[in-house]
């Protein structure tokens, strides 16, 4: 039962994390990475109160966020390295972990 929830959350994360930062107005020379997404359950409804931990592979700095009522979160990495290990946890569900990589010059991952 718990395993069936993991792919749904993971699929939602990957769908949202692949969107480019169209219209984000990134400044030239800016290296701030913005990790953003929505955590949802197997029924595709957003999950509030999930903890999202992101660790920069380059530098081992970890930042945390908690999803709001809409399941959304945002984590900022000033001078980001572009590669992050992300873990999502919520009581009653199995945690998921994966790696997110910046593609080209995008600032939203």
Image (tube, rainbow, N blue to C red):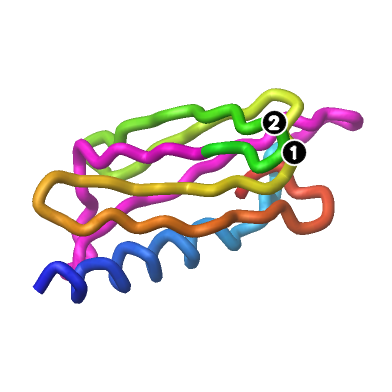
Mark 2–mark 1 CB contact (< 8 Å): yes
What residue lies at 50% left-to-right and 39% top-to-bottom?
A: 54
Q: Where is residue 30 in the image (x, y as percent from the top left)?
A: 82, 29
Magenta region, main secondary structure:
loop
| Mark 2 to mark 1 CA distance (whole Å) | 8 Å
Q: What element carries label 1?
A: loop
Q: Position of residue 25 (x, y in %)?
A: 75, 35
Residue 50 placement, left or right of 1: right
Q: Position of residue 71 (x, y in %)?
A: 28, 45
Q: Is mark 2 on a helix, strand or loop?
A: loop
- Establish if 12 lies above or below 95: below
Q: Residues within 10 Å of mark 2 (few under 14, many from 20)?
A: few
In primary-sequence order, the first of circles 2 and 1 is 2
Q: Position of residue 44 (x, y in %)?
A: 23, 66
Residue 35 placement, left or right of 4: right
What residue lies at 83% left-to-right and 56% top-to-bottom?
A: 104
Q: Nearer the viewer, mark 2 or mark 1?
A: 2
Q: Which mark is residue 59?
A: 2
Q: In which quarter of the image is residue 4?
A: bottom left
- Establish if 63 lies above or below 109: above
Residue at the far top in the pictured view: 78
Is residue 24 a member of the stretch shown in magenta?
no
Residue at the far front in the pictured view: 60
What residue lies at 50% left-to-right and 43% top-to-bottom?
A: 36
Q: Which of 58 and 73 is in front in this view?
A: 58
What residue lies at 72% left-to-right and 44% top-to-bottom?
A: 82
In this figure, which residue is indicated by the disc labeled 1?
A: 81
Q: Nearer the viewer, residue 18 or 23?
A: 18
The magenta-colored residue range is: 25-54
Q: Nearer the viewer, residue 56 or 28?
A: 56
Picture quarter with the N terminus: bottom left
């Amino acid at each position: 039962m718990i395993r069936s929830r993991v792919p749904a959350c993971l699929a939602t994360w990957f769908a949202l994390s692949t969107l480019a930062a169209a219209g984000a107005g990134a400044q030239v020379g800016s290296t701030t990475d913005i990790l953003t997404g929505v955590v949802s359950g197997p029924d595709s409804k957003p999950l509030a109160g999930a903890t999202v931990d992101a660790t920069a592979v380059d530098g081992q700095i970890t930042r945390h966020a908690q999803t709001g009522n809409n399941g959304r979160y945002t984590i900022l990495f000033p001078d980001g390295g572009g590669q992050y290990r992300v873990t999502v946890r919520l009581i009653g569900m199995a945690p998921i972990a994966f790696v997110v990589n910046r593609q080209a010059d995008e600032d939203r991952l």
